[in-house]
Every structure is written in structure tokens, then in C-alpha cells.
Image (cartoon, rainbow, N blue to C red):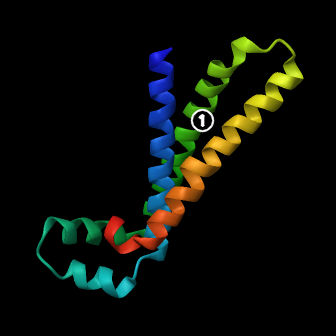
Amino acid sequence: MILEISIIIISILLSAFFSGMEIAFISANKMHIELEKKKDTLLAKTLSKLTQKPSKFITTMLVGNNIALVVYGYLIMEFLTPSISNNFLLLLIQTLISTILILITAEFLPKAFFRIYSNETL
């Protein structure tokens, strides 16, 4: 039970990270990124790698987010199943709870935060 809850929390955090990084990458100030890339630091080398192939970066973020959401969906279903016997009601409650939880904690809040602080988080 504790392991399931831990993995659910980790998958929510990973989904939030991937969603946020996607928005940070899109929203970041391109001039700021270019100025940072000219410095000879680890951050500059990392930014240079990330911006070489933007489509590859976005694809990686989307695939990571999808994997985190699949793990979350499977485990939250297992976590919420034992208490309700009516299948339709069970499906409805699982869908509502998991959707609201993901939309708030792994989509809306991280995207808002990463959009505001896009240069710093990228």
C-alpha cells in the first residue's frame, strides 16, 4: 500500500516535471538562451544540446509524460478499486478523482509555474 502511494506520487511529480519543462522550453526567452549558450559553463553546454534539436526535446518530454500518466492511471485504478462494488460507479469515481488530481497537480500548476519562471527552470 505504501509502495503504491509512493509510486503514484512519483508518477504525478514526473508528469508535472515533463509538462512544465515542455512549457518552459516553448515559453523561454530565446535571446536569453542564446546569451547563456555563449558562456563556458555546464548550463551553457546543456542548453546548447537541448536547443540543437527542439523537436527531439519536445518528443522526449511528451513520451516521458505519457509513461508517467500510464503508470499513474494503472496504480490509481488499483488503489481506488477495493471500496466500491458497482462497476459503473467505480469507473466514474476513478475517472473523476484521477482526472481532477492530474489536471491540478500535474498539468495546470506546473505549467503556470514553469511559464512564469521559464528561463530559470529551463
Which part of the image, by quadrant, shows the C terminus?
bottom left
x, y percent for residue 72 = 57, 33
| Total number of numbered discs in the rendering | 1
x, y percent for residue 67 = 53, 39
Is 43 positioned to the left or the right of 59 in the image? left
The structure residue drawn at horizontal position 88% and vertical position 24%, both measured from the top left corner, is 88
Query: Can residue 122 be seen in this snapshot?
Result: no
The structure residue drawn at horizontal position 47% and vertical position 59%, both measured from the top left corner, is 20
Task: Determine whether the residue tagged by mark 1 lies in a helix, strand or loop.
Answer: helix
x, y percent for residue 25 = 43, 69
Location of residue 8 with respect to 67 vertically, above or below: above
Nearer-the-camera pick, 30 or 17: 17
x, y percent for residue 33 = 31, 79
Location of residue 3 with respect to 38 vertically, above or below: above
The structure residue drawn at horizontal position 51% and vertical position 46%, both measured from the top left corner, is 15
Give residue 76's quadrant in the image: top right
Q: Which residue is mark 1?
A: 70
